[in-house]
């Protein structure tokens, strides 16, 4: 392996806060490395150090001689007067480079190469910055959250672009599908040190759990021995011989290991005091346009109780506008939106919340409420909610100005939940949140007893949370799909394949069974199959729910847990298979 970058014994602190100490890792030619860490532990700082924009306390950073490095920052800054093309590179009249720039920018939905950068939104500027770093063709790409501000189509294009060839890259991203499909090495920054996993994201999850289990066993062994040695230390006189002094020194090392604390995952936070009536909201043939851009046209939808809906689509198709109309923040052109009397919205917007920089984190939450009533006599205090979302007691008394961008987003999320809504509307909630927080949020939403609408480009997150999609295709066209994002993609691929086959066969004679009706109908046998599939799917979902409740209950034996853990992935596979078949048949239902 041809080494591109070698980092040895690197340390970085800000005052009393140590981000990492004595970390070492290397990146070789062709490696695609993903960097994972919790918010506020130094991911972006490490990338800034590697790009030369930030200093460090000690250690060595060695790049291969003459290595060309390209850096995509989380919040790039441009000259507002320069054109899009000039922001990408000084093309100097080279037609080949201009053509390549047009191709990449078109994929990222930037079409006017002469437009001034100052006229672009923050998201558009981030995409130009991404195009810039790709077009300069560096030997090593360093990318900080490259999927932010990209729609699903762009993300899948970038995924394929980076996965192909012998490109070398180091990136921070919360997109777990992206990590799994692009990266070949995962670096985890945790507890001021770094761990290397030579595999994709799925491999990392498996090996990380092994590491945690081994560490937990080591701490348990140290605690058992520590109690014995502590008794010896208390009995021994102060004047000790050589062997005793050696044992004393070993005791202090043992004490250090025994007193380590692994961050335990929080218990799943289940509320039972959230009531919402049977009437949620009804869109009564609403329409909305901005000039020639149609967002909705005579759109009707009646939202169901306890529904968890995902909204997906390319940028500019009206996803955020739709939820702003629902919340009364944007007027409709025609039609009505009728909201149920019991509905209490909790809205998490892309724009975020403006905080008082001099306020303490805990005070931001207690200004809203001191506790949330979970029902059955249970209450969740402001401090407990913050701890649930990984704000330690020490961090809760930090000032807001000390928080990282991801920590601010997490605090904003806590302000929304502290209001105890029964209908959550989340617009791009995953941007800038670390993977651990995303997992906690996923569990919270899975157990949330109210209604949820999520607008997100995070495919993994959507699959975990939603059971129904509205797909915004542009110019008022909306697909109502009964399933999650992966199921939609599989269905869409099947449709495209079917359409291709139909186009290829269009010059052939039509079969007799289709002579009088060009729409395919279900046969009697297929109708019976569809009815049975509905029963099977309901039974499998009930079995899955029973197993998940048993695993969370704390009264299941080890043998039962083992059996249930083996059954769960089989259940998911059976559910996916039967759901896909049901979707195929539903396309031809009378």
Image: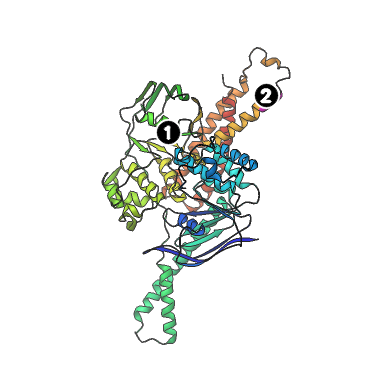
* Residue that badge 1 annotates: 320
Q: Nearer the viewer, residue 567 or 472?
A: 472
Q: Name the chief secondary structure element in magenta.
A: helix
Pinpoint residue 177: horizontal percent, then vertical percent: 54, 45
Image quadrant where residue 299 sits: top left
* In the displayed structure image, the side of residue 241 where residue 474 appears, left or right: right
**Is residue 502 within the magenta segment?**
yes
Is residue 458 among the parts visible in the rendering?
yes
Viewer-side label of 1, 2 = 1
Residue ranking furthest to the front: 93
**Is residue 531 within the magenta segment?**
no
Quarter of the figure that contains the C terminus: top right
Q: Nearer the viewer, residue 546 or 414?
A: 414
Report helix, strand or loop for mark 1.
helix
User: Which colour style is shown?
Assistant: rainbow
Pinpoint residue 250: horizontal percent, then vertical percent: 44, 77
Pinpoint residue 48: horizontal percent, then vertical percent: 48, 56
In this figure, what is the number of numbered marks? 2
- Residue that appears at 60% across and 38% down: 103
* Residue that badge 2 annotates: 502
Task: Classify mark 1: residues with Cα within 10 Å, few (<14), some (14-19) or many (20+).
Answer: some
Residue ranking furthest to the right: 508
Numbered range of the magenta stretch: 500-507
Q: Earlier in the sequence, mark 1 or mark 2?
A: 1
- Residue that appears at 39% across and 50% down: 407
Q: Nearer the viewer, residue 407 or 344?
A: 407
């Amino acid at each position: 392996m041809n080494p591109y970058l070698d980092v040895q014994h690197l340390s970085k602190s800000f005052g009393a806060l140590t981000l990492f100490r004595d970390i070492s890792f290397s990146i070789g030619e062709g490696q695609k490395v993903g960097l994972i860490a919790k918010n506020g532990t130094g991911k972006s700082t490490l990338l800034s150090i590697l790009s030369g924009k930030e200093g460090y306390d000690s250690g060595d950073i060695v790049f291969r001689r003459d290595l060309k490095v390209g850096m995509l920052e989380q919040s790039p800054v441009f000259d507002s007067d320069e054109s899009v093309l000039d922001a990408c590179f000084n093309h100097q009249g080279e037609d080949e480079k201009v053509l390549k720039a047009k191709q990449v920018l078109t994929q990222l939905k930037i079409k006017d190469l002469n437009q001034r950068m100052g006229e672009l939104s923050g998201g558009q500027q981030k995409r130009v910055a991404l195009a810039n770093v790709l077009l300069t063709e560096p030997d090593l790409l360093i990318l900080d959250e490259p999927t932010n501000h990209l729609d699903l189509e762009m993300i899948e294009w970038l995924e394929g672009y980076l996965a192909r060839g012998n490109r070398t890259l180091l990136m921070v991203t919360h997109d777990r599908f992206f990590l799994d499909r692009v990266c070949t090495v995962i670096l985890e920054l945790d507890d001021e040190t770094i761990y290397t996993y030579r595999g994709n994201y799925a491999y990392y999850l498996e090996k990380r759990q092994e590491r945690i289990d081994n560490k937990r066993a080591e701490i348990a062994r140290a605690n058992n021995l520590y109690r014995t040695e502590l008794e010896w230390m208390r009995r021994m006189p102060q004047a000790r011989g050589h062997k005793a002094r050696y044992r004393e020194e070993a005791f202090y090392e043992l004490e250090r290991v025994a007193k380590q604390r692994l961050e335990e995952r929080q218990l799943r936070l289940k509320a039972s005091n959230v009531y919402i009536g049977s009437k949620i909201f009804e869109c009564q043939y609403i329409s909305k346009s901005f000039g020639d851009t149609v967002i909705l046209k005579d759109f009707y939808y009646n939202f169901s109780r306890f529904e968890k809906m995902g909204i997906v689509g390319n940028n500019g198709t009206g996803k955020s506008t739709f939820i702003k109309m629902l919340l009364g923040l944007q007027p409709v052109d025609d039609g009505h939106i009728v909201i149920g009397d019991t509905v209490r919205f909790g809205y998490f917007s892309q724009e975020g919340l403006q905080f008082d920089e001099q306020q303490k984190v805990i005070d931001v939450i207690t200004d809203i409420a001191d506790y949330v009533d979970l029902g059955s006599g249970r209450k969740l205090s402001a401090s407990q909610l913050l701890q649930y979302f990984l704000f330690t007691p020490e961090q809760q008394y930090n000032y807001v100005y000390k928080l990282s961008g991801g920590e601010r987003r997490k605090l904003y999320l806590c302000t929304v939940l502290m209001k105890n809504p029964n209908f959550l509307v989340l617009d791009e909630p995953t941007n800038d949140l670390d993977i651990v927080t995303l997992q906690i949020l996923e569990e919270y939403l899975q157990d949330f007893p109210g209604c949820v609408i999520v607008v997100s480009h995070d495919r993994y997150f959507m699959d975990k949370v939603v059971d129904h999609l509205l797909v915004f295709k542009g110019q008022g066209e909306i697909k109502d799909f009964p399933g999650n994002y992966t199921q939609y993609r599989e269905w869409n691929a099947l449709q495209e394949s079917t359409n291709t086959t139909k186009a290829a066969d269009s010059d052939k004679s039509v079969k007799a069974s289709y002579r009088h009706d060009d729409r395919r109908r279900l046969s009697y046998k297929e109708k019976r199959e569809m009815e049975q599939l509905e029963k099977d799917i309901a039974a499998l979902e009930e079995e899955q729910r029973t197993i998940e409740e048993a695993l969370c209950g704390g009264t299941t034996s080890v043998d039962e847990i083992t059996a249930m853990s083996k059954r769960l992935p089989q259940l998911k596979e059976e559910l996916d298979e039967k759901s896909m078949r049901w979707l195929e048949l539903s396309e031809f239902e009378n």
